[in-house]
Amino acid sequence: MSAHIKSMRIISLTSNGLQLAQKLQEKHPEATLSHKPESFKNTVQKAFLEEDALIFICATGIVIRTLAPILKDKYRDPAVLVLDERGEFVIPLLSGHEGGANQLAAQLAKSIDAKLVITTANQYVEPIYTVGMGCERDCPEAELKQLLEDCLAKVELGIHQIHSISSIDIKADERGLLALAESYNKPYHTYGAKQLASVEEQLSVKSDYVYNTVGVYGVAESAALYDAKIAADICSKNNAAELILNKQKNARATCAIAKAYKENIKR
């Protein structure tokens, strides 16, 4: 799931919809299933206000009419998706970028072999995914590789979808990271503490220990975010890079994954 999504609720209204809902839940057991809720309006609005990501298997119209009175804006509303009963199409309806609906829709579409229908402007280009990593000095490539592969699996990405691997500039000569990037034929970028500090407000956690050691509050997340921003040539704060996987770690390394979209496209 996207880093913005903490919980999911699947809502179906018909017997065919229930079959699809159960199929989705099998593939995403973390989701809650509600079939023919006694009060559709109350159930939906309550879940929405609790910031659940909502996955509807029903007509788009009833979803819009039910949620319209409580909508706020794309920065605060949770992700809302709609699927048809046959499971042929997945439509991210609300909070595509900021709420993670586009990312979730892509995952669902892949899991049931459905067609992803994107309507947000930035989706006319493919998203750019970047990996940020930090590690102890002389961390073996094997440990870094295992951590990276575990992280990719969590967000259902393949290494072929990753644009680049990045870290802080004091790791420019880190043999394990250099070998990792070379083994995957990916660019390896490093950035100074001042550059990484520009994305500080987006970090999921801030470590005083890391700051006192290298001058930033988190290497992996900062590097992933800044590298994505550079890769997508972003200059608008409203379309900043975002974390799709917060910092993960093993005994000697950390890893995070970010995503961004290019802005220079036709609207």
Image (spheres, rainbow, N blue to C red):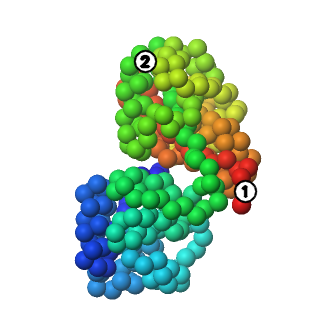
Element under disc 2 = helix
* Mark number displayed over residue 266: 1
Q: CA distance from mark 2 to mark 1?
A: 41 Å
> Does residue 78 show up?
no
Horizontally, residue 32 falls left or right of residue 140, namely: left
The spot of residue 267 in percent (x, y) is 71, 60
In this rendering, position of residue 249 left or right of residue 236: left
Q: How many marks?
A: 2
Q: Nearer the viewer, residue 84 or 224?
A: 84
Location of residue 54 with respect to 156 vertically, above or below: below
| In contact (CB < 8 Å): disc 2 and disc 1 | no
**Toward which corner of the image does residue 238 lie, by quadrant?**
bottom right
Q: Between 206 and 265, which is closer to the camera in this rendering?
A: 265
Which residue is label 2 attached to?
Answer: 141
Image point (36%, 65%), residue name: 87
Element under disc 1: loop
Q: Amino acid at mark 1?
A: Lys
Q: Specify few, some or many for label 1: CA neighbours under 10 Å numbering under 14, 14-19, or 20 or more.
A: few
Viewer-proximal residue, 14 or 251?
14
Viewer-nearest of labels 2 and 1? 1
Q: In the rendered view, would you say 210 is above or below 129?
A: above
